[in-house]
Amino acid sequence: MSAKRGPGKPSTRPQGLVADSPGPALPGADPHWYRHAVFYELLVRGFADGNADGIGDLPGLIDRLDYLEWLGVDCLWLLPINQSPLRDGGYDISDYYSIQPEYGDEEDLRALIDEAHRRGMRVIMDMVMNHTSDQHPWFQEARSSPDNPKRDWYVWSQTKNRYTDARIIFVDTEPSNWTWDEQAEAYYWHRFFSHQPDLNYDNHEVRAEMVKVLRHWLDLGLDGFRLDAVPYLYEREGTSSENLPETHTFLATLREVIDRDYGGDRVLIAEANQWPEDVVEYFGSEQHPECHMCFHFPLMPRMFMALRREQRYPITEILERTPAIPGFGQWGLFLRNHDELTLEMVTEDERDYMWTEYARDPRMKLNLGIRRRLAPLLANGRRQMELFYGLLLSLPGTPILYYGDEIGMGDNIYLGDRDGVRTPMQWTADRNAGFSRSDFAQLYLPPLMDPVYGFAAVNVEGQQRNESSMLHWLRRFLAVRRRYQVFGEGDFEALDADNPSVFAFLRSNENQTILCVNNLSRFVQPVELDLRRYTDRRPVELLGRVPFPRIGELPYFLTIAPHSFYWFEISDAPVPAVGGEGQG
Amino acid sequence: MSQPESPADLLKSAGLPQPESQLMDYLRRQRWFSGKDREIERVVIEDAGIAEGEPSLVPVLLRAEYADSGWERYSLPLSVRPAANADYRDAALVAEGLRDGEPVVVLDALLDRQAAARFWGLLEGADPLPTLNGELAGSGAGRPAHDAEIHTLPRDQSNTMLVRGETELLKCFRKLEGTSSPEFEMLEALKDAGFGHIPTPLGLIEYRTAAAEPVVVAMLQPYLHNATDGWAIAMTSLRDLYAAADESEVEDEAEIRDLVDDQGSDFTPDAARLGAVIAEMHLALAGDSMPEPMRAQPAGPTDLRAWADDMLADLETLARADRNLAAKAAREGLRRRIDAIADLPEAGLAIRVHGDLHLGQTARTDDGWVILDFEGEPSRSVEARRRRASALKDVAGILRSLDYASAVALLNWTNPDDPRWTRLQRFGDAWARVNQEALWDTYVATVGASPLLPPAEMAPALLDAYEVQKALYELAYELNHRPDWAWIPLRYLESPA
């Protein structure tokens, strides 16, 4: 069934598209495309409403693909769209084979994928493998009787004294990882909310079923998945029941099947909110690959810390501790996403560090445990936002943008839980922010209307018209980044700088060397860099192609404006001398 | 070439017709030369050698003799190149001259990349370089030679640092001590004790003669990548604080303290971690793995009396100089603070200490804090620097340094004539106090039950006395070098204990 379309809003689905057509192929498919891509994370519910029912949907999103292409997005990441009672933002799936009806149906998704592919963009979606909703028919069957064939698809026990070494993740709401089910007359295992029973991956039927689920969506043309909560698939007595070898074996099998049957350019991204040493395990190895990408979780809060501290060490420390990854692998980097800045899912060490360094600072503490968007976290400072995007686009990894942050949208912390950062995308200054033509009261959440961040002040249309807007600025830098493959694949090396407020580093491969210099301070800063290995070459600034003075034997001196950054190519080519040089 | 009879003759034939005066001229221009304020009577070339090649490497050991009858010994390796086509930095040029009738340039070998590489080669299995009276020989690492370029680090005060491939650092000593370096023995002992927060020595170049103990002329260490010294980080924090103070209207003491606590570029987590590292260093220095002559001893009344006498001597020296009335005025109070320690019944352990610990001797790296420069206070004799002391001597040094940082950052921010000065100073004082407390708390917690420190009720008196001594040392230094800054230690010395 297709999403119900409201009056006056025609379907945007391209006419004449046959349901089982293979869809347009992406030009020159590069198996490592995700290493050079820019991802855009969006909530279908909040992006654009195609049928005026107050809820965003797939046809609405299709309508906005031109915008995303214009911005320079290469891959859309859709937050969960499978059918769900929505008790956990869709991370509680009740049918893996269907789409939440408000968003549309399979046909709509196929149309989205085709339209995206036609524009050279890809589409991945969230996939929750660890657990289902307790509303899922599998769980309903399983709880009905010990003899039910689905019984063993979940993890049951007559006692709570099993797997006691596994920590409780949602300590504020869940007293135990076991919850008693009256109907089943047994405890069931859940690592997250009690309405999310864990699937039993020791059961081969479950493993086979999940492979079938993934195949179903890949057959439709989807380019991959963001795999939710992967560290928790298995449980074993006497362990933390996280990051177990069985989990890695399963992921390696999954990868093998996908590479073999889907042409080798579909992508798996692991959500493992763990310390980098443990996260790298989810890449597997060159011989036994697992996921193509993993999120780098500790980096983001440390960027905020570095800005507060006006020094680079919070960032360089964590990068130094980030192990090497296989050649195909890539880190997923983000400034903000749909989750809060959390201390729940990091290791003991990192938690200690965060408590002593971060949570002690009242301005930072305020942001723990609640979800904020980028702009309010940076007090709406344009320079700070630019600096953060500069880091996001130049540190080793693939940048992932969160919808709305490209225009500096705000949040509404009074909406509670995750909804504060899930308000409607602000397209225009018109009614309902241009998000929907429904009645205001019908909207799934009210758009922001405050004088600073509200849609009258902050919207796509206004910023598209204004060349000096945040949106145009970001688009310009995404374009610059796209011209230099080295940003996606190059080595990273932090450069020595006597000034701790300056974070300078090199990104290099065999063809290109980029020098990035960032000033983390609110004051102008000088820095002397030792660039003697490039003696007689010239740094050329990337945005304006402005040649800087030749590198000589002496330390290379730069001054950097407050919260600013420069990107230079260390040019091999002889650069024409600028006026006056050569006379002195 | 026929065997020259004296080191000076060797230098004459190498291209320096008047080696004594030419080297004296060069010495006087160097930042690492510490005799600039003294009248040099003469320079004596003690030893020299020559390794022919392109360029030739000419190690030189010389003695600067002063009119006040003191003397210092320096290591000055030279390189000699044909003047034609020679490409060198002006700063490296010692003299131009003739060798066998051909024009040559004589350069400071440590500023001449190829000569520096040959010097470095002594650590990599090259034969010892003979001099007329002895030899230069490498020991230790025996690392394979590699061809990464060698650079001289800019901005060095007392030594010359060479870096190769961003991985190794060769610290070339200029002023030489009569015996092996106190720094090297400290680093070796700390390494053996398993203390990791140091640039562990990897090898040595020594000057050896039949007559005396070997003298260290260069030490190979790992290069600390992405490091900044603690002073620079403290300055960053204070800059942020004074900016915030200027924007706030806070006046009340408690509110000032809150503002410091809530400050964005808070230094306290770093101060706390530094306190833990210093404590670990002292526990290592107090441990059983120390070689016999460096081993910890219980500190009793005799030690306390000796320490107090040392401090009083410093006080008297300063008072005699009589260059500042304020020092005199405070003297009696200071004497009482020092004398207080002589009456303590016990003082924990007497150990070898860092001796000159301040923020500039610490480096923040991606692996945490590293402690540098174990040479001790340069103006004291090697013997005095080797004397055992309470670990609190180092703690006093770093606590004083935090106070200094707040004052110097304020001088960077404005000047004492500014009407804002007194108010801002209260913020700086609060910053110093908060960070001193953070450092002290983790220091004490890390030391734990070890007998290192005096009993808790006695520790403050000893710490206070060491702080006084450190401030006297600072005052003497400032009166000689930066009289405008003398108020910084004076302000401390004049404040009640």
Image (cartoon, rainbow, N blue to C red):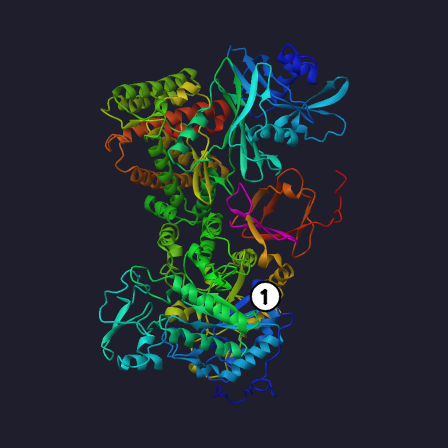
Viewer-proximal residue, B392 or B405?
B392
Is B246 left or right of B137, judged from the image as shown? left
Q: Quadrant of residue A18?
A: bottom right
Vertical placement of residue A220 versus B49, above or below: below
Q: Residue A159, how many percent across, how many down?
A: 22, 69
Three-letter amino acid code at disc 1?
Trp
Q: Residue A107, how many percent across, how many down?
A: 52, 84
- Based on the picture, tell me whether residue A511 belongs to the magenta stretch: yes
Residue A371 appears in view: no
Vertical placement of residue A236 versus A352, above or below: below
Please name the residue shown 65% across and 57% down the image. Answer: A543
Q: Residue A573, how many percent across, how many down?
A: 73, 50
Viewer-proximal residue, A511 or A369?
A511
Instruction: Report crowding for label 1: few under 14, some 14 to 19, many 20 or more residues within 10 A (C-alpha).
Output: some
The segment highlighted magenta reads A494-521
Residue A8 appears in view: yes
- Based on the picture, tell me whether residue B163 belongs to the magenta stretch: no
Please give the residue where the numbered disc 1 appears in the rendered image: A33
Viewer-proximal residue, B319 or B370?
B370
Viewer-proximal residue, B379 or A174?
A174
What element does badge 1 sit on?
A: helix
Please name the residue shown 48% across and 79% down the image. Answer: A216
Q: Residue A152, how many percent across, how many down?
A: 31, 75
Vertical placement of residue A335 versus B144, above or below: below
Q: Which chain does the residue under circle 1 lie in?
A: A
Quarter of the image with the C terminus of chain A is top right
